[in-house]
Image (cartoon, rainbow, N blue to C red):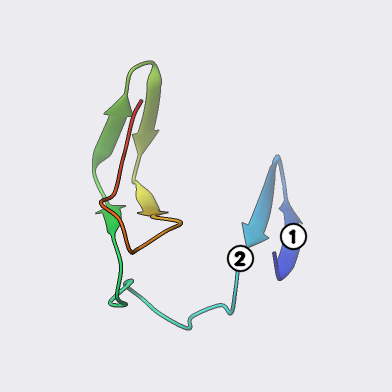
Amino acid sequence: MTDVRFRSDSIVRTFGVPGAMDHPAMAGNYMAYRGNRLRFGKLTMTDTDMILIDLDPKDPFDFYL
C-alpha cells in the first residue's frame, strides 16, 4: 500500500505506484473488470474497477468463489 486517503465517508487505498499501468499487460494470469455492474453471489459492485491477479503466474489461474 503506497497511499491512504480519507474522503467523506470512505477510505481510498492505493497499492503500488499510482498510474504505473492502466491495464495489467504483464506476463501472468489475471481477470480485469471495468465499468457496469459485477456480481459475485451477494457481492454487487457498480461502476466496477477491479483486477484479480494470480499470485503464481507459472500455474493456471484458479478462481473459486
- In the orientation shown, which residue stands out farthest toward the top? 42
Numbered marks: total: 2
Q: Quadrant of residue 64?
A: top left
Local packing at callout 1 (Cα closer than 10 Å; few below 14, some 14-19, many 20+) is few
Q: Position of residue 26 (x, y in %)?
A: 32, 77
Q: Quadrant of residue 13?
A: bottom right
Q: Secondary structure at mark 2?
A: loop
Q: Position of residue 35 (x, y in %)?
A: 27, 51
Above or below, comparing residue 62 to residue 53 in the picture: above
Residue 15 badge: 2
Residue type highlighted by circle 2: Phe
Residue type highlighted by circle 1: Arg
Residue at screen point 65% across, 55% down: 12
| Front position in the image: 44 or 10 | 44
Q: Position of residue 7 (x, y in %)?
A: 71, 52
Mark 1 vs mark 2, CA separation in Å:
12 Å
Which of the image's four quarters has the C terminus? top left
Residue at screen point 29% across, 75% down: 27
Q: Position of residue 2 (x, y in %)?
A: 71, 71
Which of the image's four quarters has the N terminus? bottom right
- In the orientation shown, which residue stands out farthest toward the front? 59
Q: Quadrant of residue 34?
A: bottom left
Residue at screen point 37% across, 27% down: 44
Local packing at callout 2 (Cα closer than 10 Å; few below 14, some 14-19, many 20+) is few
Q: Which residue is mark 1?
A: 5
Left or right of 17: which side holds 33?
Answer: left
Q: Secondary structure at mark 1?
A: strand
Mark nearer the N terminus (1 vs 2): 1
| Front position in the image: 31 or 58 | 58
Left or right of 4: which side holds 18?
Answer: left
